[in-house]
Image (spheres, rainbow, N blue to C red):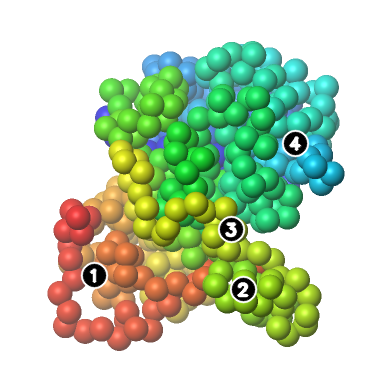
Amino acid sequence: MRIILDGHIHSKYSRATSKDMNIRNIARFAKVKGLNVVATGDFTHPGWLKELKETLKLSPFEGLYQPAENEENVYFMVTTEVCTISSFEGKPRRIHHVIWVPSLEVAEQISEALSAYGDLEADGRPTLNMEPPELVERVTEVSSDNLVFPAHAWTPWFSLFGAFSGFDRLKDCYQDMTGRIYALETGLSSDPPMNWRVSELDRLAIISNSDSHSFWPWRLGREANVFELPEPSYKAIVNALKSKDNRRFLFTIETDPAYGKYHWTGHRSCGVSFPASEAVKLKGICPVCGRRMTKGVEERVEELADRPAGYRPEGAPGYIHLIPLSEIIAAALSLPGPQDRRVWNIYEKLIARFGSEFNVLLDAPYGEVEELAGKPVALLLAHVREGKAKIEPGYDGVYGRLLVDEVLGETGKRVKGTLEDFF
């Protein structure tokens, strides 16, 4: 059975998150997206945990839940994200971690254990005064089935390898608990090839999740993990990750890392950004105002890499770069954004024909997309599939931007029809 999992999202109890981020909306739009397993997020928040108990029921598959009021064929994995605050070598470290657990009962036990370290009601992603290895120990002593891994590992702030408060080595962060870390989340501004350049990460499963703060499908599932499993149970998913078996853990769905908000080094206030090689020459100083720029993920990877670009570990699961369908439509038609009603009208036509967004992005024939959405949309979608889409890289909190003029100027060129044509 093909499983598409988004294993890190947030609820309405997290800061800067849609107040309509509830189980009903998450399940509805996960189905539209094409996800069949999705995270609950935020189980450490007492209010959300109460809602999860009221709105979810056990599914036929061990360790997963489904909405109590409807049958969307969408299953929920119980998850949360926490921030640990500690000090290492005289420098404060604020690191975000994702926690997966096999049941709401286990989630309640972990919440009770972690309540001694911070106010769990303050935010869906609580801040805990504890060191990362202590977090791992407390979580895994509740159950060996629990999984802890670093969230958005390369983001400049609040991450394992973050330029401002992170570490240079996995072991520096998790110390004697490093052996209990089995996965690493790429974040939007990095992808597997960037992580493969750091040999220390070889034993980890490189995974991707949306970290979504909204149920809309241009956020939910924008990054995900694809498995081939007998059934979508919690243990089957976790075991596939731990084993890194590329017959079970097939590939990740990634936004192109240039699309992320921190790919290049730059300074938003001055509107300047630079690739790693140029940023190093500038010594990280903005040439406009003379202040320090926000170091991008590309530059940070170059600092820690001990392998050349293009290296791939033997047997590593694959990946594919995609852009959310709504954003492809908006860019192709020069519309303000994915929330525009005209974008949504075309989006709904495509979903009605092909069943889900991933079906459109991965498999829909070019001719049928053109028939429903027009040539510009079909042409840009084909370029995204083929890996030919050009992106102006994001930097310092600014998302990257699809560059469409060259693509939409093409006429009469044969465009391939489905995903299989590109491999």
Q: Is mark 4 on a helix, strand or loop?
A: strand
Q: Name the mark nearer the viewer: 1 or 3.
A: 3
Q: How crowded is mark 3: few (under 14 residues within 10 Å), some or many (20 or more)?
A: few
Question: Circle 2 is placed at which residue position?
Answer: 279
* Alpha carbon distance from label 3 to label 2: 12 Å
Q: Report, in whole angstroms, how far the alpha carbon at label 2 lies from the one at label 4.
A: 30 Å
Q: Position of residue 38 (x, y in %)?
A: 48, 36
For residue 300, above or below residue 207: below
Bin the neighbour count of mark 4 within 10 Å (Cα to Cα): few under 14, some 14-19, many 20 and up. many
Q: Which of marks 3 and 4 is nearer the N terminus?
A: 4
Which sits earlier in the primary sequence, circle 4 or circle 1?
4
Residue that carries the numbered disc 3 in the rendered image: 303
Q: Dot 1, how many residues are within 10 Å of its Cα: few (below 14), some (14-19), or many (20+)?
A: some
Amino acid type of the residue tagged 3 in the rendering:
Glu
Sequence-first disc among 3 and 2:
2
Q: Amino acid under label 1? A: Glu
Q: Name the residue under label 4.
A: 84
Q: Earlier in the sequence, mark 1 or mark 2?
A: 2
Say which of 131 and 13 sits in front.
131
Q: Nearer the viewer, mark 3 or mark 4?
A: 3
Residue at image x 42%, y 58%? 308
Residue 135 visible in rendering: yes
Amino acid on which disc 4 is placed: Thr
* Secondary element type, mark 2: helix
- Disc 2 versus disc 4: nearer the observer: 2
Disc 3 element: helix
Residue 230 located left or right of residue 140? left
Q: Earlier in the sequence, mark 1 or mark 3?
A: 3
